Amino acid sequence: MECEKPIEPFEGPAAPWRFNFFVREIAAALIGMGSGSSYTSVAETARSQAWGPGRKWNRSEGTVVNGALVAEWLQQYGPIVSEPYQETGWPETLVLDSTTFLHTDSWTGVQARLFSVLFAYGYPADGTKPRLWKIASSLSDTGQDWAYFLAKLPGKPQVIVCDDDTNIKLGIRTHWGQGRPVHVHTCEHHLYLRAKKALETDGAPRTSPLHKALNKAFKSPEGWDVLRDEVRLAGSPTLKKWMTSKSAMVTAQLARRGEVSVYANGAIEAPIRVIRENIERRAWCFRNRVRMDLLLDLMRLNINKVASQDIYSTAIREHLKANGGRPTTTRKQWDPLGTSSLRR
């Protein structure tokens, strides 16, 4: 039995009003969901702890063991534990990327989009540790979806780093199209990979001067010029075509490279992998966008290493003390019958 201190003498058991689960058990469930466990497995763990040996304590014959219990906890207590860690504005440097979840029909083999998740990784101007800044589900990842995502927080970053993604760049222009522009720095690693693929298409040998020039092409205007000269001399039609299409963008980017401190979007790739590992195997089950965003935020706290059972317990307990033992957040957030807020 773990001590539930600090608790005032008049408080009684550390459990919500008319509730059979302790605050610490709810906090443990939120930690479990944030680490990627399914609703059902988290609910089973919570019930096994509460019902005691044989899981019979306070369990009626009609009790159904499923994930509905912790889904309600997510909506009731998720906002409470995540509120202290919500970002209040966009940082100085922002890295953007997304991932899309698909489903393949086992009968027809046809693959269809389920939903996308949009990510923002931030580098604050005050030098504090960079972190996963914002994460949200979306029906798709169009320019308008990105504009809506960027409107979730106030402020304007100085630099945004992203892949050469037309949807992200359209979303940036749509949201911050007026006034001082936001400098968009296309990920240098992805530019390198696309140029390298063009060289491979043309069959350029590894010992070719083209490969040597490519290694420095995105670090300075001089490096880009050297690559262009080598293409002119050695000939590489696919690379030449690619460079022509990207010349204006790369030239402008290299001219202000000295103002940028982050050159690639590699930092955001690890969080994306974690989220995919957490939900890909059950992506088909997610249909409610409000609840999905609450779950993603718990995962964000876990990725940022601020998730703590003690901290969550304290936050929940203080909230209940201030509100007569009852959570003020809604217990159920259902979509209208026959609809899904996370699917088209």
Image: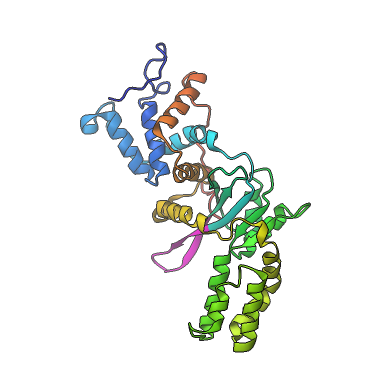
| Viewer-proximal residue among 55 and 22 | 22
Q: Is residue 19 left or right of residue 266?
A: left
Q: Is residue 258 left or right of residue 50?
A: right
Magenta segment: 99-116
Looking at this rendering, what residue extends furthest in the left direction? 54
Residue at position x 43%, y 64% in the image: 104
In the rendered structure, does residue 197 fall within the stretch colored magenta?
A: no
Quadrant assignment, res 229: bottom right
Res 64 seen here: no
In the rendered structure, does residue 101 fall within the stretch colored magenta?
A: yes
* Image x and y of residue 57, in percent: 26, 27
How many numbered discs, if any?
Answer: 0
Looking at this rendering, what residue extends furthest in the bottom direction? 234
Looking at this rendering, what residue extends furthest in the front direction? 222
* Image x and y of residue 166, in percent: 64, 64
Residue at position x 42%, y 23% in the image: 16
Q: Quadrant of the N terminus?
A: top left
Quadrant assignment, res 308: top left
* Image x and y of residue 20, in percent: 35, 25
* Image x and y of residue 295, in percent: 47, 43
Quadrant assignment, res 55: top left
Q: Give the main secondary structure, helix, strand or loop, of the magenta stretch.
A: strand
Task: Give the color scheme: rainbow, by chain, secondary structure or one colour.
Answer: rainbow
Residue at position x 71%, y 56% in the image: 174
Please determine whether, in this image, residue 260 is positioned above or below residue 205. Answer: above
Q: Quadrant of the C terminus?
A: bottom right
Res 67 seen here: yes
Looking at this rendering, what residue extends furthest in the top direction? 10
